[in-house]
Image (cartoon, helix red, strand yellow):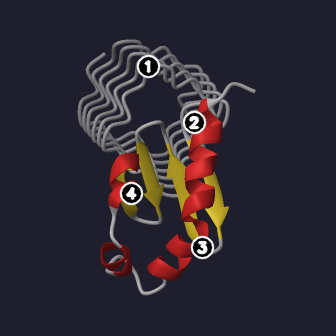
Amino acid sequence: ANLRSADLCGADLRSADLRSADLRSADLRYADLRNANLCGANLLGADLCGANLSGADLSGTNLRYANLRYANLRDANLRSANLRSADLCGADLRSADLRYADLRNANLWSVVGNMTKVHSMQLQEYSITFTTEVLQIGCQRHAIEEWRSFSDDYISDMDSMALKFWTKYKDFIFQAIELAKEPV
């Protein structure tokens, strides 16, 4: 199906078969896509803000630059999905299958992680999200190794409270990252 740039805002597409559909730049804000089959679909730059994608099959889907802010991706199959540069701010990824998913440059601020590939926690005023490569604290997203090498001056320039927070919690955050790598 060619639904490129289609206006499907708020549409009820529960259990729809949209395999390999061209949905580039489509407006799917607040759409109900529960249990929909979007396997291999092209959702490049699509607006899925607030969409309900729980239980949806998004395996192999192109979600590059997609707006998934506050989307419900709980129990979704995102295996091998391309989420590069996607905006996942506030998205719910609990129990989502993110095996082999590409999350490079994705905005992970305030994400509820699946606790396998994407981990999340809240410490005081900062939302913290991390993968094996990236750590995002508040709106600051950097490679974990970069965080390890940041000077106090660099951290201080991030936010007025950043250095105090970083001094207090950095060892705990790095310990959490290391513990998340170990099998239970």
Q: Which residue is mark 1?
A: 100
N-terminal of the two: label 3 or label 4?
Answer: 4
Q: Which residue is mark 3?
A: 168
Residue 144: percent from left, percent from top = 40, 48
**In the rendered image of this protein, does residue 99 appear above or below residue 12?**
above
Which of the labelled discs sits on residue 73, or is there none?
Answer: 2
Foreground residue among 159 and 41: 159
Foreground residue among 81 and 119: 119
Foreground residue among 74 and 120: 120
Please give left or right for residue 180 compared with residue 6 in the image: right
Verify CB contact (< 8 Å) between mark 3 and mark 4.
no
Q: Which corner quadrant holds the C terminus?
A: top right
**In the rendered image of this protein, does residue 123 appear above or below residue 118?**
below
Q: Which corner quadrant holds the N terminus?
A: top left
Which of the labelled discs sits on residue 147, or is there none?
Answer: 4
* Quadrant of the rendered image containing residue 133: top left
Q: CA distance from mark 2 to mark 4?
A: 28 Å
Q: CA distance from mark 3 to mark 4?
A: 14 Å
Is residue 112 in view from this perspective?
A: no
At label 3, counting other C-alpha atoms closer than 10 Å, the crowd grade (few under 14, some 14-19, many 20 or more) is few
The label nearer to you, 1 versus 4, is 4
Q: Residue at x 64, y 62 (%)?
A: 122
